[in-house]
Image (spheres, rainbow, N blue to C red):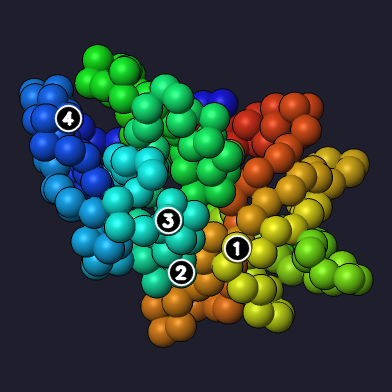
Amino acid sequence: MSIEPLETGRKLLVVGFERALKGRVDESLSALGHRLTTAGDGPKGLRLAYRRRFDALLVSHPVAGAPTSRFLRAVRGPESACRTSPLVLVTPQKSRRDAEVYLGRGATRVLTLEEVPQALPDVLQPLFLVAPRTTLNVPSRIEVLGRPFPRRVFCETVNLSSTGMLLRVPHSVPPSTELRFELFLPGLARPLRGEGQVVRLTLQGREPYPGIAVEFRALAPSDEAILATHLRSDRA
């Protein structure tokens, strides 16, 4: 899909790395103009992630001082300033499969200790890209999963990118809720269909409508191509 780069020089949060490894990471990334903030364990990392937005997080696995699952849930919580920041878990090769369980569940990428620091720039660079987005008002329908009887809700898409959308909804849908969606783009004979997860609620007083931000988790390849074409044509 079409992407455009953000500005250079990033703010990175490094959580739970031992001193020797932290020194190698500093040397690798500082040379590229990135600014690193260090937290020795999970609780300290969470305090920083809640208060300040970082362009990416590098987190040891297992997370020192907190279970990885609990740390990721907190970082992705609606009150966290880093709820949408890319997050890379760094783990020994023997624990790689264990860490990969968290991909799509808070973690964006997994990197082994053996690959640090040489592979870090190549892993981080694609994460420092923003998907093109467009403002629009089109009808959508979501089906809330994980309930005995799935709840279907008609709503309105007001902002769309290749990775997610912002929906105006009549009912509250809490963060972490998994859902199926249908997106009715103009000029199409059928809706685009996929699955996603609620990653945040709109902030009362700062955004003009009650809504939810949905991150795409699954989209048919043909629908992904249609969406990319729509975004490119809208930008043109």
The alpha-carbon separation of the residues under discs 2 and 4 comes to 31 Å
Q: Between residue 154 and residue 23, name the one nearer to us.
A: 23
The alpha-carbon separation of the residues under discs 1 and 3 comes to 18 Å
Q: Between residue 131 and residue 90, name the one nearer to us.
A: 90
What residue is disc 2 on?
78
What residue is disc 4 on?
21
Q: Is residue 200 above or below residue 33?
A: below
Instruction: Name the residue: 71% across, 80% down.
Output: 170
Q: Position of residue 83 (x, y in %)?
A: 41, 58
Are dots 2 and 3 in contact, CB under 8 Å? no
Dividing the picture into quadrants, the one containing residue 71 is: bottom left
Q: Tag 2, which secondary structure?
A: loop
What residue is disc 1 on?
176
Q: Position of residue 46 (x, y in %)?
A: 29, 62
Q: Tag 4, which secondary structure?
A: helix
Q: Is residue 143 above or below residue 110?
A: below
Disc 1 residue type (three-letter): Ser
Left or right position of 200 against 221 = left
What residue is disc 3 on?
67
* Between discs 2 and 1, the one toward the N terminus: 2
* Between discs 1 and 3, the one toward the N terminus: 3
Instruction: Name the residue: 76% across, 45% down.
Output: 194
Disc 4 residue type (three-letter): Leu
